[in-house]
Amino acid sequence: MLTVSGLAHVAIRVTDIDRALDFYVSKLGFERLMHLDRDDKLWLVYLRVTDNQFIELFLDGVGDRAPGPEVTGYNHLCLSVPDIDKSVAELQDAGIELSRPKVLGLDGNWQCWIEDPDGHRIEIMQMMSDSMQSRAIAARN
């Protein structure tokens, strides 16, 4: 069995790196940590979520939008927040529209949804102490 210590990064292909950086850095507040070049050309940009979790933005995406939620493959990125109401206000202050409003999910966690400029779905979630996940973790211990 593989021993995993965490989720290191999520890689997203974008069509316009400047537009993506405006969204992820200027509006969501992630730090542009570093970049990698390939063949003397910008290849990908690392954004810091935590000191060991990153979002990788790869350039030169093809197509108008990310595939819909029913398509096999990447479905969405979920960002955990301590206060969903504060996060909704911060998103609104940044000019980011909710693609789905704040609701209490079937798992017992508060959530709302946004999309990046390429249509990648992002869930904003406040994990609740009585959620299915919290109860399942407590039962393991």
Image (cartoon, rainbow, N blue to C red):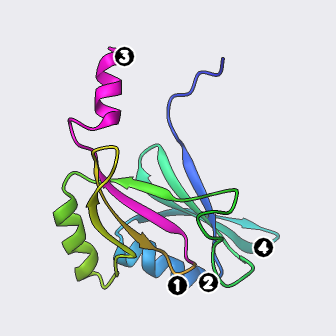
Residue at the far front: name it: 106
Q: Disc 2 vs disc 4: which is toward the camera? A: 2
Q: Tag 1, which secondary structure?
A: helix
The residue identified by callout 4 is 40
Return the disc, 2 or 3, that comes first in the chain's sequence.
Answer: 2
Crowd rating for badge 4 (residues with CA inside 10 Å; few <14, some 14–19, many 20+): few
Crowd rating for badge 3 (residues with CA inside 10 Å; few <14, some 14–19, many 20+): few
Q: Tag 2, which secondary structure?
A: loop
Residue at horizontal 32%, vertical 54%? 125
In the rendered image, residue 81, in percent from the top left (x then y), is placed at 27, 54
In the picture, measured across the screen, residue 100 lies left or right of residue 117, that is left
The vertical placement of 62 against 51, above or below, is below
| Circles 2 and 1 in contact, beta carbons < 8 Å | yes
Residue at horizontal 36%, vertical 16%? 140
Residue at horizontal 52%, vertical 81%? 117
Dividing the image into 4 quarters, which one contains the N terminus? top right
The residue identified by callout 2 is 16
Within the image, what quadrant is residue 13 found in? Answer: bottom right
Query: Gap in Å between the C-alphas at discs 1 and 3?
Result: 43 Å
The residue identified by callout 3 is 140
Span of residues in magenta: 119-141
| Circles 1 and 3 in contact, beta carbons < 8 Å | no
